[in-house]
C-alpha cells in the first residue's frame, strides 16, 4: 500500500499465452539501474509521460492515473468511482459489452481500471504487433464509455453481492469500522466500493458526471515501458488522452488527521477469531522524515519474518499467523496502520503485545544492528520492483504521483544510506507516540470498548 507497490486491479481481460509469458520476461538488464534510463516525453498536445524504451521483447505496458479517485464520489453516493472503473471496459464507442470484450480477447489486450482513494487508475498491456488496436480500445474506453443498461445492472449486482459478503467478513468489517471512525465526515471515511444502500441509487448520470469531472488532462500522470519509442508514444498520448477536457473539476478535499486516537471500538461478530486493526497518524511522503519512518516501520512490522511484531506475536507466542504494520501516505492524510487476527480468547494478549512493541519502539527506537540490516534489505530488494514491465511502469507512475522527481531511483540509495541511528530513534518517537485507534471484530476476550479516547 505504499510507494513501493500497488494493489491488484479488479480483473484481467482474457489474454493469449504468448502475452502471459512475455510480460514476465520483460526484466530489463540491471533492473533498477536500467529503469533509471527514463525519458520525459511531451506530446504535441502538451501531455507528459515517462518512458523506459526497451525493444528486447515486443510488449508495451502503459500505466496511468487521474488524481481524484473515490474521493470524488458524491458524499451521499459512495461507490460511483468504483462502478465507473468496473464499466469502462464493458462497452465503448461502437462496441457493446460483448463486442468490446471480444476485441480485447482476440488481440490479447489487457485493459484494466481501478478506483483508489486518491486516484483513478488504468493499465494497458499489449503485444507490439497489436499496439494500434489496443490503443484504439483504450481511447474508446476513456473517451466514449457507453454505460449501457445491461452491463450497468450486471456490474451493480456483482458489486452488491460482494458488499453483502463483506457484511459477514471480519476483515472487511474491521477495515470499514476503522476508516469510518478515524475520518468522520471526510471522504476517507466513506467506503470506496459504496454500501448496500448507496450502490442501488447510482445511475448512469452519476457515472457520466464522474468521468466528465475527473478524467482530464491536468490531473493525469502516465508511464510507459517496452517496445515503443518517444515519438510513437507522443502520438499515442494525443490520440488517447487529447480529447479529454483540459482541466478536471475536482472537489476541495480537506487535509485530515485520524480521529479517536486512544479509543477501542469492538464490533460483535460470532466468529472464532478476532480481527484487529490499529492506526494513528503517520508521516507524509514529502516529509524529510519519511525515509527514516519507512525504515522504522520495516523493523517494527513491515519486514515480515524479520520484524519485531512477527517475532513477538508469532514466533515467541504463536498468537497469529501473520501480523503487520504499514505506512500509508495519502494525498490528504498520512497514516500508520497495524493489524492481525488471533483466537478470540487470546485477543487481549495479542493486542497488549502489539501495543507494547509499538511503545518500546517509540521509547527506544531501533538498535544499530536492526538499522544496518534494514538498510541492507531495503537497498538490496529494490531491484525486484523492476523485474517486469508491469512493475517498472507502476514504479514510474507512483514516483510521479508522489512528486519525487524523475531522478528518484538514482537518489534512493543515498537517501537510505544517509539515515542515522539518531534519526530513526527520533522519528520512531514522532511516528509512534501519538496514540492509536483500535477496532476489533469478533468476540474478543480481554478487550473492552471505550466510547471516548483514553
Image: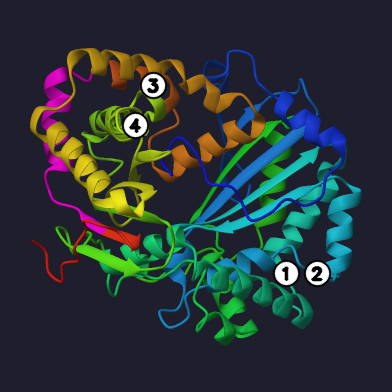
Q: SS class of the residue under badge 4? A: helix
Foreground: disc 4 or disc 3: 4
Residue at the image point whose x is 11% and y is 21% from the top: 422
Q: Which residues are magenta?
A: 418-438
Q: Earlier in the sequence, mark 1 or mark 2?
A: 2
Other-residue count near label 1 (Cα within 10 Å), few / some / many at <14 / 14–19 / ≥20: some
Considering the image in quadrants, where does the C terminus appear? Answer: bottom left
Q: CA distance from mark 1 to mark 2?
A: 5 Å
Where disc 3 sits, the SS reads helix
Residue 101 lies in quadrant: bottom right
* Residue at image mark 4: 310
Mark carried by residue 144: 1
Question: Judging from the image, what secondary structure is the residue with disc 2 in?
Answer: loop
In depth, the one of 222 and 81 nearer the eye is 81
Q: Position of residue 308 (x, y in %)?
A: 27, 28
Whether residue 282 is visible here, answered yes or no, is: no
Q: Disc 3 or disc 2, which is closer to the eye?
A: 3
Q: Is residue 86 left or right of residue 171?
A: right
Residue underneath mark 2? 93
The residues tagged by marks 1 and 4 sit, at their Cα atoms, a distance apart of: 49 Å
Q: Nearer the viewer, mark 1 or mark 4?
A: 4
Q: Which mark is residue 164?
A: none
Q: Which mark is drawn over residue 378?
A: 3
Could you tell which of marks 1 and 4 lies nearer the N-terminus? 1
Amino acid at each position: 500500500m505504499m510507494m513501493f507497490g500497488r494493489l491488484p486491479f479488479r480483473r484481467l481481460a482474457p489474454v493469449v499465452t504468448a502475452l502471459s509469458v512475455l510480460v514476465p520476461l520483460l526484466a530489463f538488464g540491471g533492473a533498477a539501474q536500467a529503469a533509471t534510463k527514463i525519458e520525459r516525453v511531451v506530446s504535441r498536445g502538451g501531455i507528459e509521460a515517462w518512458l523506459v524504451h526497451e525493444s528486447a521483447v515486443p510488449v508495451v505496458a502503459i500505466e496511468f492515473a487521474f488524481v481524484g479517485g473515490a474521493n470524488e464520489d458524491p458524499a451521499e453516493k459512495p461507490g460511483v468511482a468504483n462502478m465507473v472503473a468496473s464499466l469502462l471496459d464493458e462497452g465503448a464507442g461502437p462496441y457493446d459489452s460483448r463486442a468490446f470484450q471480444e476485441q480485447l480477447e482476440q488481440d490479447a489486450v489487457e485493459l484494466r481500471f481501478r478506483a483508489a482513494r486518491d486516484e483513478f487508475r488504468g493499465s494497458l498491456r499489449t503485444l507490439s504487433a497489436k499496439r494500434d488496436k489496443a490503443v484504439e480500445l483504450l481511447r474508446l474506453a476513456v473517451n466514449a464509455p457507453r454505460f449501457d443498461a445491461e452491463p450497468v445492472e450486471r456490474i451493480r449486482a456483482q458489486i452488491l453481492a460482494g458488499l453483502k459478503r463483506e457484511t459477514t467478513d471480519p476483515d472487511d468489517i474491521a477495515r470499514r469500522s476503522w476508516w469510518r471512525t478515524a475520518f468522520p465526515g471526510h471522504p476517507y471515511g466513506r467506503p470506496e466500493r459504496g454500501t448496500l444502500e448507496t450502490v442501488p441509487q447510482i445511475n448512469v448520470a452519476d457515472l457520466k458526471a464522474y468521468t466528465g469531472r475527473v478524467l482530464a488532462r491536468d490531473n493525469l500522470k502516465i508511464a510507459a515501458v517496452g517496445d515503443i519509442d518517444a515519438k510513437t508514444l507522443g502520438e499515442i498520448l494525443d490520440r488517447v488522452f487529447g480529447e479529454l477536457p483540459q482541466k478536471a473539476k475536482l472537489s476541495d478535499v480537506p487535509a485530515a488527521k485520524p480521529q479517536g486516537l486512544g479509543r477501542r471500538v469492538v464490533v460483535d461478530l460470532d466468529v472464532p477469531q478476532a480481527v484487529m486493526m490499529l492506526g494513528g497518524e503517520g508521516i507524509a511522503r514529502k516529509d524529510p522524515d519519511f525515509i527514516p519512518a519507512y525504515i522504522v516501520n520495516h523493523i517494527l512490522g513491515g519486514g515480515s519474518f524479520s520484524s519485531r511484531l512477527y517475532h513477538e506475536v508469532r514466533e515467541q507466542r504463536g498468537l497469529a499467523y501473520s501480523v503487520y504494520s504499514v505506512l500509508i501516505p495519502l494525498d490528504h492524510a498520512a497514516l500508520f496502520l497495524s493489524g492481525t487476527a488471533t483466537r478470540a480468547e487470546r485477543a487481549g494478549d495479542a493486542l497488549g503485545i502489539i501495543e507494547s512493541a509499538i511503545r518500546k519502539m517509540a521509547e527506544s527506537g531501533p538498535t544499530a544492528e536492526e538499522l544496518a540490516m534494514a538498510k541492507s534489505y531495503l537497498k538490496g530488494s529494490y531491484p525486484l520492483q523492476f523485474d517486469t514491465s508491469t512493475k517498472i511502469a507502476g514504479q514510474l507512475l507512483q514516483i510521479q504521483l508522489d512528486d519525487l522527481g524523475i531522478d528518484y531511483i538514482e537518489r534512493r540509495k543515498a537517501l537510505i544510506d544517509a539515515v542515522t541511528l539518531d534519526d530513526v530513534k527520533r522519528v520512531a518517537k514522532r511516528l509512534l507516540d501519538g496514540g492509536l485507534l483500535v477496532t476489533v471484530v469478533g468476540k474478543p476476550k480481554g478487550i473492552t470498548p471505550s466510547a471516548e479516547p483514553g
